[in-house]
Image (cartoon, helix red, strand yellow):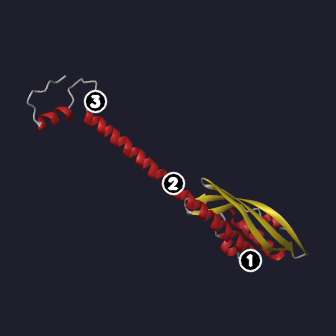
């Protein structure tokens, strides 16, 4: 261990504290302070990032709610062009086939979005429909369980399974 002269100046003292002697097993107070500050900075950063991701998830949940409402409302009023924007590209052909059948046979009298839940990039929505078929104008009720997925490339929620086929004859 280094010995300090009896009349050490502040500069000499700072040098002794900043540079530990070679082979010394104990870190200096300044090094410990730096380590503690680095840990505190990392914890603060983790907290900020965590809060930011929760805010992002909240925004995504709000976006999912709005998308579920827009999709189902578009289908209700026969605006299938708007609804098709929320269908993955691979499912477009099937969607348009069902849309033609829907236009010719089914009308939605009312819908109620009961729940919308988000789990990471996946979402689920439960929607109660009151509908009738043109061939039989008696009202029917059915709750559909739609599955949604967030597409990072399009930055949008897309319906994976709308279950609208269950309203068709």
Q: CA distance from mark 1 to mark 3?
A: 72 Å
Q: Position of residue 138 (x, y in %)?
A: 90, 73
Q: Position of residue 70 (x, y in %)?
A: 66, 71
Q: Which residue is painted at 34% across and 39% down in the image?
A: 36
- In this orientation, does residue 80 appear? yes
Residue identifier under label 1: 77
Q: Position of residue 121 (x, y in %)?
A: 60, 55
Callout count: 3
User: In what quadrant of the picture does the N terminus appear?
Assistant: top left
Q: Secondary structure at mark 1?
A: loop
Tell me if mark 1 has few (under 14), some (14-19) or many (20+) residues whose alpha carbon lies within 10 angstroms of its own. few
Q: Position of residue 145 (x, y in %)?
A: 75, 59
Q: Which label number is shown at residue 53?
A: 2
Q: Which residue is painted at 28% across and 35% down in the image?
A: 31
Residue identifier under label 3: 27
Foreground: disc 1 or disc 3: 3
Q: Earlier in the sequence, mark 1 or mark 3?
A: 3
Q: Earlier in the sequence, mark 1 or mark 2?
A: 2
Residue 135, by quadrant, is bottom right
């Amino acid at each position: 261990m280094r010995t300090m002269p009896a009349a050490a100046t502040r500069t000499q003292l700072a040098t002794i504290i900043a540079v530990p002697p070679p082979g010394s097993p104990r870190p200096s107070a300044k090094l410990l302070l730096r380590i503690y500050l680095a840990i505190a900075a990392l914890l603060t950063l983790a907290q900020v990032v965590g809060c930011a991701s929760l805010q992002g998830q909240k925004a995504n949940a709000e976006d999912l709610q709005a998308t579920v409402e827009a999709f189902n409302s578009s289908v209700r009023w026969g605006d299938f062009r708007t609804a098709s924007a929320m269908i993955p590209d691979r499912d477009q052909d099937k969607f348009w086939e069902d849309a033609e059948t829907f236009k010719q046979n089914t009308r939605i009298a009312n819908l109620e979005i009961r729940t919308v839940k988000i789990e990471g990039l996946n979402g689920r929505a439960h929607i109660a429909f009151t509908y009738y078929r043109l061939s039989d104008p008696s009202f029917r009720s059915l709750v559909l369980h739609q599955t949604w997925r967030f597409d990072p490339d399009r930055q949008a929620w897309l319906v994976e399974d709308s279950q609208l086929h269950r309203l068709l004859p």
